[in-house]
Amino acid sequence: MNSKSIDAVNILIKYYNSLSILKKFLIPSIVGFIFFLFFYIYILSNTTYMKKTIQDVNTKSIPVYKTIFDNEFLLQKISYELHSAVVANEVDWINDTEVYAYNFRKNLEGIKKSTVKNELMTIEDAFNIYYKEATTLSKELIMSQNNYDYIHRKTVLVVNKYNKLLHLFKELREKVKNDIKNDINSIYSTSSKILLDSSYAFILWIILSSLALFYIYKDMSSRINQIVSQSENIASGKANFHKRLSTISSDELGLVVNSINIFISKLEKNHHELEDARDDIQRFIADTVHQIRTPLSSILINAEMIRDLQTDDSLSEFIDSIDASINMLSNSYEDLSYVTSYDSIQYNPNIISLSDLLYKRIDFFKTICKMNLKEIKSNIHENIDLYINIVECERIIDNNISNAIKYADIEKPISINLFKTKETNKITLEFKSFAKEIKNKNKIFEKNYREEESKRGLGLGLNIVKNICDKYNIFYIASYKDNQNIFTYTFEEIKRK
């Protein structure tokens, strides 16, 4: 394509992109209307030609053809009347044929404006000569003024002129017949051409309209899908802030795209601000957790020293209360420490004894249970191993025990069961507590979700458990049976070597 063609195409594309959606869908209809307007003019011109041809046949060719037959009849009538006059020896009858001759000439005069004017003049001249000699011969035959040889020669000449006149009529009749035939063939071919062209035009219009509508549909569909995809990414938090939607069109979708791009730009700015704020909060939490470690360790050591140095049990209740509070604080500290470090520290799995770890964590929570008037009863099978990071396994156990202590009924046992099923070689860990039934068991593992707003907490514990279970493909479920909330975890067995 040359530069002019390319420029023309670019102008058309630019004009198309400037149109509204409604106008774009009207393009095929408007183009089709213009196309059929020109086609209508084409049909009108052809039908006008056909009408003129039919008119010529009706006003020129057919009257000539009819006149030929009429004059042939008049010629025969003149010949018959002249013959009758000779036989009857009536000269007056010869004069009576003048009426037929007059009608003959009058008929020719009426069609001299036709396309066969020259042929008609030739016939008229031939008729005048024939009629003059035929009437003269008839009168001579009646008067018998000439001898036989003269009459014979004269008769032969008249007959030849009569035959010549018949021949001229025949030629003209064939010519007019061919002209009528050609005109009819022309009308037929023109009408056939119009029908065929109409079919082609309709098919062409259907194809072009379908292609135009398909292009517009694909264009709209592609842009709408782009908008929907970007909107879904924004809604799901997966927006690509380094990419903007293309805005090649200024129609309604183009306005929507511009609005989305403006929104993405503002969202990008807010996102960067939120990321900076999140980084500041994470650094603050990490620094706070780090600074808590030293005083917390100091409090634990001093509490143990006080317990060792006391001479009676008068301070035991207070020391137990301090130990319980410190242990709960220590558990929250471990949750915060894990949350702030799991992105930066790699927690690699190892084979650990789940049985031994459960005993240790139950022992850790004994003082807390005592101060909350609750008791842990356990049924733990020995020598059950897991392939998991010990810190993450500890987070699973501690958060389930601490939740049970927080929400379980007072003076009701908290049951912890660990067993493996021989049929499936699966390890099952259960935490049971008598308490009010959890309403939304599916949302209980979501971040920041709490069944009872009155119970203060970070809302991170079970979400940490969920993330660890997802990491190791551990099946987990919350259920309610026999007035107990049950949290069940199913692991794959690790056999000892």
Image (cartoon, grey):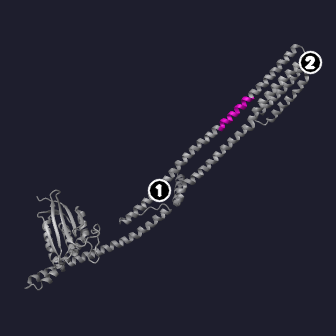
How much space separates mark 2 and mark 1, taking CA atoms? 105 Å
Q: Nearer the viewer, residue 474 or 80?
A: 80
Could you tell whether 470 is left or right of 379 in the image? right
From the image, tell me which residue sits under label 1.
Answer: 219
Q: Amino acid at mark 1?
A: Asp
Q: Quadrant of the C terminus?
A: bottom left
Q: What residue do we see at 82% from left, 25% from top?
A: 77
Highlighted magenta segment, given as a residue range: 172-187
> Residue 198: which quarter of the image?
top right
> Residue 327: which quarter of the image?
bottom left
Q: Earlier in the sequence, mark 2 or mark 1?
A: 2
In the figure, 7 relative to 350: above or below? above
Could you tell whether 301 is left or right of 71 in the image? left
Q: Amino acid at mark 2?
A: Met
Q: Within the magenta stretch, is there residue 112?
A: no
Mark 1 surroundings within 10 Å by alpha-carbon count, few (fewer than 14), some (14 through 19), many (20 or more) = few
Mark 2 surroundings within 10 Å by alpha-carbon count, few (fewer than 14), some (14 through 19), many (20 or more) = few
Query: Please, which residue is most extreme toward the front here?
Result: 482
From the image, tell me which residue sits under label 2.
Answer: 143
